[in-house]
Amino acid sequence: MQQRTPQADEVAQANAILAASSGAQDQLLPVLHAIQDAIGYIPPDRVVDIASAFNLSRAEVHGVITFYHYFRTSPPARQVVQICRAEACQSMGGDALLAHAEQALGCKLHAHSHDGQFALEPVYCLGQCATAPSLMINEALHARVTLTRFDALLAKVKEAA
C-alpha cells in the first residue's frame, strides 16, 4: 500500500495533542494513543516531533510504535477483520478460517484488500477459547465462526457499507 502524506488537519491535531502533553516520558503511550484515536494512525513524519516533545530519539519512539500491535503507521481500512491466532482457535479450525478469509478478502495478514475497504489483522486471544475459532469485524466479536458463517458476516458488512 502506498504511503500517503498526512493532511494539514491531521498534522494540526497531532501538534495540539503534543502541545497539551507534559513531555514526561511516562506520557508517551497516552499521547500515542491520543494521536491514533484522533487521526486513525500515527503519521511516520510526526515521529520526529513526538521524539522531540519527549526528549527521546526517533528510534526510541519508532520502537514503541512498532512494539505494540495496536499502533498503525498508515491510515486504517474502513473495515478491520481480526482473526484470532492463539492456540485454541488454531486447533479448532483457525488456520482454515484464516486461509478462507485471505481468499475472500484478497489480501494476506497485515495487509489491505486491493480496494482499501478491508484490512486483515491477527489478534492473539479474544478470550473466547471455549467457542473457537473467533474473530472480530470492526469492534464486533464473533465466535464459533465457520467458513460459511464468515461469508455471511462478510456479506452483511459489505451490504451495510
Image (spheres, rainbow, N blue to C red):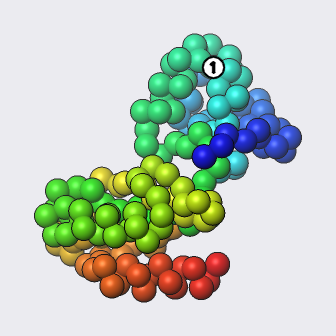
Residue 71 in sight in this render:
yes
Q: Position of residue 98 (x, y in %)?
A: 32, 64
Q: Is residue 86 left or right of residue 5?
A: left
Residue 39 spot, x, y in % from top left: 70, 48
As displayed, is residue 95 above or below residue 76?
Answer: below
Q: Is residue 79 above or below residue 66?
A: below
Percent coordinates x, y for residue 136 in the rendering:
41, 68
Instruction: Choose between 93 and 89: the one closer to the eye.
Output: 93
Q: Residues within 10 Å of mark 1 (few under 14, many from 20)?
A: some
Instruction: Tell me, yes or no, if residue 35 can be seen here.
Output: no
Q: Is residue 127 left or right of residue 5?
A: left
Residue type at numbered disc 1: Ala
Place of residue 141 in the rendered image (x, y in percent of width and height, measured from the top left): 39, 72
For the C terminus, give its image quadrant: bottom right
Question: Relative to residue 55, is residue 18 drawn left or right?
Answer: right
Q: Residue furthest left?
A: 91
Residue that label 1 marks: 51
**Which residue corresponds to the image point at 50% horizontal and 84% vertical from the top-left?**
155
Image quadrant assignment for residue 95? bottom left
Name the residue rendered at 29%, 69% in the picture.
97
